[in-house]
Structure formats: structure tokens, C-alpha cells
Amino acid sequence: MADDPDRRKFLKVTSCAIGGGVGLAVGIPALRLVTDPATKTTVTAPSDPFDVGALDRFRVGAEPRKIELIASRVQDGWTTARDVVIGAAWIRRVEPAKVEAFSAVCPHLGCAVGWTDGKFLCPCHDSLFAINGQRETGPSERDLDPLPVQIKDGRLQLTWVRYRVGGATREPA
Amino acid sequence: MSTRAFLRERVPWGYQPGTMPSGASFAYVFGTVLVWLLALEALTGIALATFYSPSSTDAWASVAYIQDRASLGWLVRGLHHHGGSAIVIVAGIHLLQTAVAGAYHKPREVIWWLGVVLLALVLGTAISGYWLRWDQQAYWAAQVEVGIAAGGPVLGDVIRGLAFGGNEAGNLTLTRAYAMHALLLPGVIALITVVHIALARRHGPTLLRRAKAAVPRWPQQTVRDVIAVAIVFVMLLAFTISQDGVELGAPADPTTAYDARPLWPMRWLFELRALAGGAEQLVAMLAPFVVGGFLLALPLLDRGPDRSVKVRKAWLGALAGVFAPISALTVMSFARDANDGALAERRAKAEARATQARKLAATYGVPVTGARDVFQTPPMARARKLFATRCEGCHGADSEDRKGPVIAPGHGDRKWLTSFLHAPSGDEFWGRTKLAKAEAAMKPVELAAPDLADLVEMLYAESGATDVDAVKRERGLAVFEAACTDCHAREEGMPGSSGPGLGGLNSRAYYLSFISNPKSAFHMGTDKSQMPRFDGELTLADRDALAEYLVWLRTATPADLAKLPDP
């Protein structure tokens, strides 16, 4: 009886079914937990514009200046912190009433773009951009990402946008 | 070539399930259940590790995040915690069953020894894991446990240094506990478990007393194993859900007393320590070694070969003599706590604090300065606490022995200014101060309604408020020049000839300067104010926080205030 092939088969299937069921009952909650952050905004900062300073700080015709953007309050997972640098922008006063700003994030793969010899250069993969943000050489498929700026009461305000890196089209990440 | 044949050639290992020489039985399931529980701990542990942050500032916050904000985090954490308890219980059954059956007899002594070592390692893993949440319970348990371990006659400082990672509990305590709990101990447990099982398979199961015909392990024994696993899992799951996972206390706070208790498998030591009186340190340190030593020595003392209970009465009696007191002490300890009304009250208070901390963490996040500062996260929390302790007595609307003007929502707004000008010595203003009775007390301002409104607008503008009617303010300045400048001035920092300066009235800077030194010439002067100066009492940051709060109060309603959690 104990060696009845049908019974053995039944016991085997039962063992696998129960074992698999218990495994799934633990595995699924564990997997749900691990994948939880994948669909969440875990790092948040206020979306209102940054006050970059008085417009007078920027001279017409001067080289672009790198400005660190300091968020008043950043929530990062479980922590909350005040005055956290969340990005940087290259800012240039083109005309007395016209200011241009570019995200310092390279549109190719997200390294930090620097200013070298009159050009923007990404040191990771040598993407080179002109002073107006136009791409010249290197692997980047698009120009530097401009950031919205406005002048209000003699002060410069800039809105930070993080764009998706890679690709020729620009879309917020 | 089939994939199967391809692999057969290259990975020439076959699984030999073996046979059960005296038949399959539920008596044999405990080892498998333990292996499965260890696997559950590994799986849930890895999931938790993708969130956990072992630092004294972040640990509690990351656990609170798992518990309250990550999907099913409470369940995974609960299964991990109670799964650990299940291991201790099932391992205890496994050990007692082996002992009663005399299964440690030759040639299986090494299997027994490895099992005893595994139990000790499991307890070590449980204790180090208990620390990781870094709530009140964990923090104080760690303090006490290290205190006992380091209290011995030799090497105390070395043990403390190794356990804490330095002189005090902090970041290095948690990184070390984490490495122990998640890397070292599980690694060693896995290795020893493999050897333990390999030896058990090599020697085969101890024969059942009522032997049946031999059967293959797979599937006859396996099906019994998985049924047992399923039963244990369902019990574990039901218990975990009934407990809403596992508790998380308020963040570790070295300044707040807490009724710390060790993890339940160590409760007997807690009770024993209490009974030992002056010898507590020695007893608490030696008792685990006595128990462990006895278990390790058992196969050497009771050498068989007869496995019958009758012959081994003395040894089984000794075993009972060890485990019965442990059980009794455990029950006594829990019973004592259950009957302690004062303790229940303190626990309820601690629980309320924990609930508040978790709610705040879920709403505002935990400050990077540390989990303890989570209580400071609601708007104005610091200032409101300061106000409640330092200001409310004299300025609270409901305060029985109020000595100064009421400070409440709407303080310094247009309505407040108007009421003040109508009756500076009214009860809610200077009425209860010595100023009200002084000869030089400010008289009610008698102006035509439009003039008064203009003056109010001008005074209101001093606060730096942005919703000012510029035209009215302009007219108000003229009213001020005509009606007020005999006593007051409005230039920044300039006192009036006989009244306080009103430059920047009710602005943050004004409040800061007033709180710092109300007796300054710019404000009330030494003879007119009973309010003490606070520049020596409170830090600049605290005074500024209060000033910010007073500005906030101007536009706040009583409902806004009621919405904020208690300071």
C-alpha cells in the first residue's frame, strides 16, 4: 500500500502544493515590500521657484555662473531635512532683461556638467555644449536642458526641473 | 542533447533522499520546520534590510517607515520578529524531544552539540536583532545587557567596548549589532546547520519505538514535513496579524526612564537576577553558562546504550530540573508585570508617546538630527513647548494667576491693536500689571473712527505684515505724529520720551528683542515691567523660536492652534 504508485504521486503533488503555497505566502509580502519604493516618490522637495538672488549679481556678458539650489525642506525616505542642496544650475545674463539657465545635469547620462574654456563640458563622456546650451560634439542626443527663470522685483527666480536623462526629447523625470 | 542530460554531465550531483528505516512519522518534522523557519527569517530579513538604516539617528526612523509607510512592511517585520520566537520554541521542542528519546547517544553526540550551539547562536541573533529598532525598549535592553556582560570581574571594559563599539551606545553599536545579526550570526548558523543536517542524514534518524516498515523519505516523510510547516506558518501568520505585526516604541531617549524588559527567552534571567539580590550580576552572567554547560555535557554523562526512559530517569530528571525553573521563572516574571498597576500606567504612557512619535514620523518625516527630534517636527513645536512651560503662566488666557497681557491667536492683528488702543489697561492687556495702576499709565486713545483705523493700519504695518493698505497707513502716520509722539517714537530702536518705542512693533525682531530684555529702555524700562528678561534664561534660538511663534499667532485662529499636536 505504501508503495502504491498513485498514492506516491498524490503525496508528491500534495507536498509540492503545500510547500509552494507556504513559500508564496511568505515570498509575496516580502516581494511587495521590496518593490514598494519602485512606484513611490520617496524624495520630495517644495516645487516653488528658488530665489537665486538679486539680478545685479549677474553681469551682462559675464561667463555662466553655477548656482546651487538649496531646498528649504527635503523629505528623503524617512528623514526630513532643512536647507538641502538638490541640484545646480548654470546661469547667464544674456541681456539686461534676459537670463538663461541650464540644468547642470548632463542630458546624456546625468553627470554634472562643468564650464571649461568657453564651453559646457560633461567630464564623464565628453559631451560638449556651446554657451547657449546647443550640443556640439559627444554622445548627448539633445541640448542642455533649460530651466524656467523669471525676474521679479529685481530678483531672479528659478524653477528646478529634473529631466529624464538620455534620448533626444526632453521630459520631466 | 536534452537540457537535462546537458546538466547531468556538468553538474553530476544527485539528490539522495534516503529512507526512513522505521517509517515516516510526525515525530521527525521538527528539524524541517526549523530549517524552513530559518529560511523565512532569511527571506523576510533581506526584505527588511532593503529599508533598514543602522545609525543611531536613522534606525528608528527607517523601522517606523517599514512599519507605517511601506506596503506590507508591518507584516514582513512582524513575521520576522515572531518567526524568531517560533524558532526558539520549535528548537526547544526539538531539543527536548531529542533528549527524551536519548537520540544524543553514540554516535550522534556531535549532532547534539551542534544543535545546542545553534540554539545559543539563535538566541544571540535574537538579542542583536532586538537592538536594531533603537526604540526605548531596544535602547534600554542594550544598556542592561551590556551592563551585565561587562560587569564581570575581568575584561568588563573590553566587552563593553566590543558590544557598544566604543564607550557609549551610538552609531557604532548599531552597525556592529547589524553586522552580527544580519551577516555573521546567520552565516555561522547556516554553516553549522548544514553540518548538523549532513551528520543527521549520515547517521539516519533514531528509530521509532513503534517501528513500522521502512519507507523512502520522499514523499512519505516530506508530506508530513510540509504539513507541519504549513501548520506552524498558519499559526505564525495568525499570531502576527492578531498583534498587528510587532510593536515599535518611542525613539531611544537616554533622558527618559523606561521599564525595559529583555526578549521573552531571556525573561527567566531577568526574574532570577531580581531574586538573586546582591549577587545579581554573578547569577545573571553564570546561569546561561550553567544551562549551556549541562546541555553540552549530557551526552558524556548519559552514555547509553539503553535509550529507554526508565533507565535514564536520573538524567531526564536533571533536564527537567533545569527547564522547569526556567519556565517557572519566565511565568513568574510575566505574572509580576501583569499584576503591577503602576507599571501598566507607565506602559500606557509610553505607548501613547510611541503612537504620537509614529504619527509624527509618518506625517512630517524624522529630522536628520535624530529620531528623538521627531517630537519637534510639527509646526512651532519647540516654541509651543517653550511657551507652555515659560510663558503660559503669566500670559495664558486660561491661566489662573495670569500676571501680564493675554497672548492668544490674533495677538497683534488689527482687531487686537484696536482693542488695545481703546483700553490699554483692560483686563486682557495691561490690566493685571502694575503698569495699569501707575500714574503714567497709557490712557485710552480717543480718536474718530477713521483716524483710529488709519493709526491701527500704521501700527499694523510696523510688524512687517504684507497685507497693508498703503494709503491708510500713510494717513495713519500723520495721526501718529499728531497723537502719539509725545510719549512714543516709531524709529527702529528708538525709545519714546515716556513710553516704549514702537519701531517694528510686533515684528519677529521686535518680539525677539522684547523677550530678550523687556526692561530695556526701548521697551518697558526697568521700573515698569515685571516680566523677567530671558536673554540669560533661553538660548537665542529658543527666543527666536518664540518670536516666530508670536508672529504666527497673529494670523492663526484658535482652530489652527487646536489642530497642532500637544507640545
Image (cartoon, coloured by chain):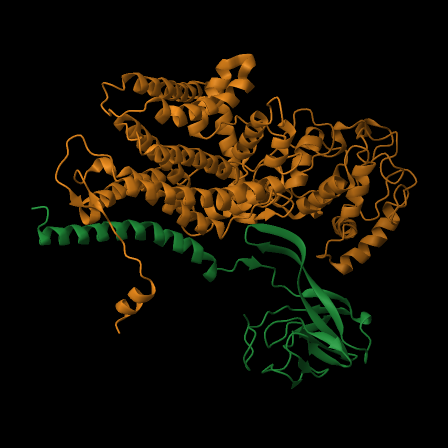
Can I make out residue B448 in this image? no
Judge left or right: residue B165 versus residue B182. Answer: right
Residue B189 location in percent, x, y?
A: 43, 42
Judge left or right: residue B23 versus residue B150. Answer: left
The quadrant in which the C terminus of chain B is found is top right
> Is residue B420 or residue B205 the one in the foreground?
B205
Residue at 13 percent of width and 37 percent of height: B212
> Is residue B336 or residue B329 the one in the foreground?
B329
Residue B153 location in percent, x, y?
A: 61, 21
Which quadrant of the view contains residue B499? top right
> Is residue B225 or residue B563 the one in the foreground?
B225
Residue at 84 percent of width and 49 percent of height: B480
Residue at 70 percent of width and 57 percent of height: B467
Which quadrant of the view contains residue A131? bottom right
Can I make out residue A50 in this image? yes
Residue at 23 percent of width and 47 percent of height: B18
Q: Residue furthest left?
A: A1
Which quadrant of the view contains residue A50? bottom right
Residue B137 location in percent, x, y?
A: 52, 32
Judge left or right: residue B519 versus residue A74. Answer: right
Residue B477 location in percent, x, y?
A: 83, 53
In this rendering, the answer to whether B403 lies above or below B16 is above
Tint of chain A: green
Tint of chain B: orange
